[in-house]
Image (tube, grey):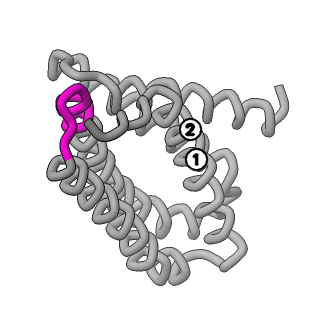
Amino acid sequence: MNLKCKSFCIVMALVMVLSSFVMAQTSPSDNMQFVIEKIRADKKLLIAENMQLTEDEAKAFWPIYENYQHELFLLRARTKKLIEDYAEAYDDMDNKTAKMLLDEYVTIEDLKLKLRSVYLPKFRAVLSDIKVVRYYQLENKINTALMYEIGAQVPLIKGPK
């Protein structure tokens, strides 16, 4: 299996696992911790296979990557909570709740952009711009696939009552 095909398969596996994590309402914590660790390992493998890091680059990159992933995880947990709140309010949605949900969504999106901006100089300090672009592309591809999967499962808000 060539690298491109293998990478695609890993991305799709990540999407399926991540989407089930985000959409899950309840899960035993031990099982969830296993799932989270599996996601992180698979994603790290995908990044490693595609980044083509030298030994020196890898030593500098991976600690920054781990910190970035931790902060991304916190944002994904916040997104999961937003989806749960939406699901809970779905049948009885009112303007006040819709406003609160929308404001939280925009806040999360702003925080994602800020996080990428904060980490950009950190990644640039240890990698060439070409490799930083490649890394951000990989993150974007994974996130786009995940958001597509989640978007397909979340129903549109009902019209006004």
Q: At 38% from the left edge and 62% from the top edge, which residue is drawn?
A: 109
> Residue beneath label 1, please?
144
Instruction: Look at the magenta stretch and give its main secondary structure.
Output: helix
The stretch of residues the image draws in magenta is 84-94
For the view shown, which residue lies furthest in the right direction?
2
The number of discs equals: 2
Determine if the magenta segment contains residue 92: yes
Left or right: 112 in relation to 86: right
Please, what secondary structure does the residue beneath circle 2 have?
Answer: helix
Please, what secondary structure does the residue beneath circle 1 have?
Answer: helix
Quadrant location, the C terminus: top left
State the CA–CA distance, disc 2 to disc 1. 6 Å
Left or right: 65 in relation to 133: left
Find residue 34 and report its horizontal and vertical position in percent. Answer: 29, 23
For the view shown, which residue lies furthest in the front direction?
161
Mark 2–mark 1 CB contact (< 8 Å): yes
Tell me the number on the disc at residue 110. none
**The quadrant where residue 18 appears:** top left
Q: At 49% from the left edge and 65% from the top edge, which residue is drawn?
A: 61
The one of 36 and 21 positioned closer to us in this rendering: 21
Find residue 23 and report its horizontal and vertical position in percent. Answer: 34, 27
**Relative to 126, is 141 above or below?**
above
Amino acid carrying label 1: it is Thr
Tell me the number on the disc at residue 148. 2
Amino acid carrying label 2: it is Tyr
Find residue 15 and report its horizontal and vertical position in percent. Answer: 53, 32
Find residue 114 and report its horizontal and vertical position in percent. Answer: 37, 75
**Relative to 89, is 56 above or below?**
below
**Relative to 156, is 115 above or below?**
below
